[in-house]
Amino acid sequence: MMRLTWLQPEDLLPHEFRQAEEEGRDVSSVRARWLAAGGCPCPPPSGASPHRASPELRALAESLLTELEGLTDEAERHFEPVRRLRTRREAPISGVQGRQPLVAGRGGTGESPAGPTHPARLHAAWLGRAAGCLLGKPVEKLPLEAIRALAKSTGNWPLHTWFTARGVPPGLRDTYPWNKRSARTSLAENINGMPEDDDLNYPLLNLLLLQRHGKKFTTHDVATTWLEELPAARTFTAERVAYRNLLNGIPPPRTARHHNPFREWIGALIRADVHGWTNPGDPAAAAEQAYRDACLTHTANGVYGAMFAAATIARAASGTADVHESLAAGLTVVPEDSRLARAVRHGIQLAEKHRDFDDVVDQLHATYGTYHWVHVVPNAALLAAALTHADGDFTASITRAVSGGWDTDSNGATAGSVAGLLSGDPNALPERWTAPLRNRLATSVGGFHGTGFDTLAALTARLTTEPAPQTGEPAPQEAPRP
């Protein structure tokens, strides 16, 4: 019998218990009623519990989800709000740790960041995002000990090249099987171009978004673009719930809250690249765009993760910043007391303290191991640690991000995007990472299937400076912000 992942009420409810507790709410009485009725207390790690719930249990789960969400003004206050900090263009963005102030809209040399070298940086960023994602695909969902054991068995530890099944002892393969959907296209012996992945689909969607609506798009425009171009089966976690909510007539931004326990997971962060790429040298503008995108599916730290990534990428895209200045810019656009910001700072501090990245990873897992492997907080900490420890080196950036576990393909993708920008040119990336991509990607989004990364870079560069499209129709009004 078909089971839809990330949507069944009986699967969502245990995740909601955990998410509500992370937000500081007491759900003990609701959990007790669920357990007394025979409900499972543990969130399913892969989106669906092994057995279908009875109609009565499913109805109870639906009712309890609604109760936890709350529909009154009093209940709304339980949701951790999204606080927008220093994301207006007119507000100066200050540097940190004694560095020079970052000035919105400038790269630091007096030259336009979107100058003649910007397309080359974008080409490297697209290639870097693809390579980092592809590196992480075969070990997505695997525990940290599995990633280490599989890589060590083939002499690939510390991780420095693609994963391979060649030479892995049969017993180890049985204990730690590769990601079954990805292994056939992402192990070294199988790679032939970039296979479809949501970490590449969302940047493509955002190219369409900017083509149709310009940089002043609304959250409603994001929703419309999804419904027109994104197959529902290509969504996961918070995005799948929000998509379902749209189909049920629920408008943004409530789409991010209604029966959506994944509202602080990594999905909005992986959509942030285009917002950074098209605002080189302007972290504030990038974060503002990422905010409007993220509010369709996420709240609080889920939104902050997207803003942090977009601002980091925008600073790296300027061509005048190193990785440390880029991460510092990312931190300026999120509340410094948020769980996201604290985790990012912790990751950076660990990377600065330890020479062996395995020690960094072990401490991150000890601190954040209670989170789901797709939650934005541990993954943002790992991403920041990997980029800091690699100090701008491309191979070190993507291999550290992937070797740290959790959401391996998403972390590898974002690390590759940042490190690709910092490299400045696609020819600066090692050929072992770019040649297997064969300058093409697979996708079910729009008309992009088979498109080359050079073509995508050229389109992204045009969208960096193009004026907003003139549709002759009034822009849809955005829903009130949380």
Image (cartoon, grey):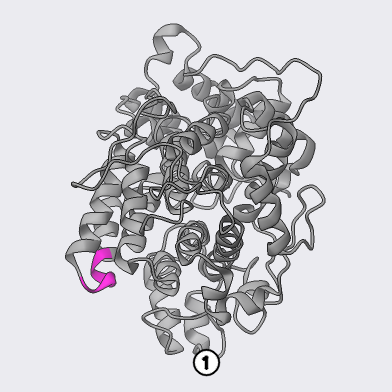
- How crowded pointer 1 is (Cα within 10 Å; few <14, some 14-19, many 20+) is rated as few
Identify the residue at the far top of this view. Answer: 73
What amino acid is labelled 1 in the image? Gly
The picture places residue 474, in percent across and down from the top left corner, at: 75, 15
Q: Residue at x 73, y 38 (%)?
A: 211
Say which of 461 and 344 sits in front.
461
Q: Which residue is mark 1?
A: 167
Say which quarter of the image contains residue 59. top right
Q: Could you say where residue 212 lies in the image, as x and y percent from the top left?
A: 75, 34
Q: Which residues are magenta?
A: 355-360
Residue nearest the viewer, comparing 228 with 139: 228
Which residue is drawn at the image coordinates 71% and 70% (left, top)?
A: 439
Query: Who is closer to the viewer here, 81 or 468?
Result: 468
Q: Main secondary structure of the magenta part?
A: helix
Q: Is residue 167 left or right of residue 123?
A: left
- Viewer can see residue 211: yes
Q: Which residue is the extreme one toward the front?
A: 110
Per the image, label 1 sits on a secondary structure element best described as loop
- When asked about the image quadrant of residue 401, the answer is bottom left
Residue 430, given in percent of the width and then of the height, sits at 52, 79
Q: Is residue 80 left or right of residue 115?
A: left
Q: In the displayed structure, would residue 32 be above or below residue 283?
A: above
